[in-house]
Image: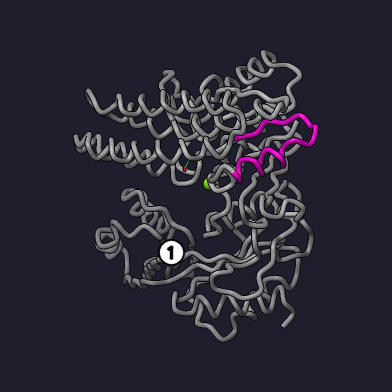
Amino acid sequence: MKVLKFGGTSVGTPQRMKDVVKLISDGEQKIVVLSAMSGTTNSLLEICDYLYKKNPEGAYEVINSMEKKYKKHIAELYTTDEYKTITLEFIKQEFDYLRSFAKGIFTMFEEKIIVGQGEIISTNMVANYMAEQGYNSCLIPALEFMRTDKNGEPDLEYISKKLKVQLEENPDKEIYITQGFICRNAYGEVDNLQRGGSDYTASLIGAAIGASEIQIWTDIDGMHNNDPRFVDKTSPIGHLHFEEAAELAYFGAKILHPTCVQPAKFAGIPVKLLNTMAPEAPGTVISNETEKNKIKAVAAKDNITAIRITSSRMLLAYGFLRKVFDIFESYKTSIDMVCTAEVGVSVSIDNTNHLSAIVDELKKFGHVEVDKDMCIICVVGDLDPDNVGFEAQATNALAGIPVRMISYGGSNHNISFLIHESDKKKALQSLSDHLFNNK
Ligand code: ASP
Ligand code: MG
């Protein structure tokens, strides 16, 4: 069975919902994960914000304008009076429920319930539409099977067991619709998988049922080999290894939630990124296979600070790096890149909340220099140490640009360069020209 996930823009209007329904009904059995209609989760958070501030009027205003919008959607989505009435009644109950939170205390628990309503609404709308149009589909509630454990991590065993029950209770359906994002915690309370968590839901469901494939549908034709905002002529990548995708996601390719791929990766299930606007396009396949001898993509991460600590005491000494890293750890500041020499070490960080305290402490160990407004350029692909020439190609492309750090060998999939943010556009363009466009 396949798992298909559609994000907020893919279900953002009644027409888009109809398009999704057309796309998913090909006779194959599948589980379909939906996000809230785009903008809804933000509005729900705004309601919570007013309620935290004890301003029910503010909350009512947002609720009323949302309700008005949803009523319009219903008028557009359904053709029969029967389903218009059923869904209007459902929407009325939903918004009355939201209004009920304006009375009484408001805490994190209530907030979690409110932010999850967007997915409850969108899935009910689509499920009702499919019922109206006579599709063989049903809604399976995520809150019946999606669950995290006491550490806040998804409880895959529980998810697998309870999801099976839901599927068995509704046998012979072609399409099972469910909510992304929402779950229960270990105590049974309503919770969620963090913003953008619907991708994670799809990946978890895929792993739980041993799906043949997980499809993430958005409105872009897969992952691109460079950032189209800064570079002309980028193209979609046909295939990526899970680790390449994780690197790219971390370094700024906004298309996939980095934790999302984890369950699929461990279960060995390929993830396909597809485009609702161009369903025939091949998109990007992410799997545990490496495409040999190929550099795949380039991404950049801004707002990086580089710190260099030099000390002759480091020469032939052991324990120096530990002392340096301990300081970062005590300020809960994670390090992205590390480069060492006999008499010094350079690291890069992106969280500068504790920069001055960290620098103060580092000064006990050596001379400290800080460079701000730096940028990490990450090149991913088959960068296995046994392959010759690929690092050189990447380095050559940056020949005209001052490079502050180079990191290679940490994985088989990546080489990273630290440069000044002001050189970013030039660096990205030059990498594209050299690596992908044969210039
Ligand atoms: N609706 C949630 C959000 O906006 C989850 C998702 O769309 O993935 O963050
Ligand atoms: Mg998303």
User: How far across and down, in percent of the image, does residue 103 sit?
Assistant: 23, 24
Answer yes or no: is residue 96 visible. Answer: yes
- Element under label 1? strand
Q: Which residue is mark 1?
A: 347
Q: Residue at x 65, y 27 (%)?
A: 132
Magenta residues span 15-33
Name above or below for residue 314 compared with residue 116. Answer: below
Could you say which quadrant of the image residue 335 lies in? bottom left
Near-viewer residue (23 or 367)? 23
Question: Of residues 419 and 365, which is closer to you in this image?
Answer: 419
Q: Which residue is at the front of the view, 156 or 206?
A: 206
Q: Quadrant of the C terminus?
A: bottom right
What colour scheme was applied to this rendering of the protein? one colour
Of 57 and 168, the residue lying toward us: 57
| Residue at 32% in and 68% down | 366
Q: In this rendering, does residue 364 appear at all?
A: no
Question: In x, y percent, where is residue 244?
Answer: 64, 55
Q: In the image, residue 48 lies at what x, y percent?
A: 30, 36
